[in-house]
Image: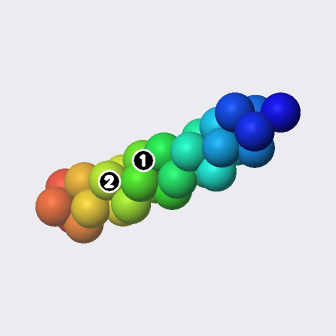
Amino acid sequence: MHQHKDNQPKIKDAQGSFRVETSRSNQLHS
């Protein structure tokens, strides 16, 4: 159960990082 709780925030963090990288790529492309 502890691993499941730790896994949830990790996935959320990964998605947030991916969104930031996409935003940066968009600005560079503009």
Disc on res. 26: none
Residue 19: x and y in percent read 46, 54
Disc on res. 21: 2
Would residue 3 be found to the left or right of residue 30 on screen?
Answer: right
**Mark 1 belongs to which amino acid?**
Phe
Query: Vertically, is 12 above or below 23?
Result: above
- Placement of the C terminus among the 4 image quadrants: bottom left
CA separation, marks 1 and 2?
5 Å
Residue 15 seen anywhere in this rendered image of the structure: no
Residue 12: x and y in percent read 61, 50
Q: Quadrant of residue 4?
A: top right
Disc on res. 18: 1
Residue at x 83%, y 33% (from the top left corner): 1
User: Which of the two residues, 5 or 15, is positioned nearer the viewer here?
Assistant: 5
Residue at x 27%, y 62% (from the top left corner): 24
Q: Give SS at disc 2.
A: helix
Would residue 12 be found to the left or right of residue 16 on screen?
Answer: right
User: Which of the two residues, 28 or 17, is positioned nearer the viewer here?
Assistant: 17
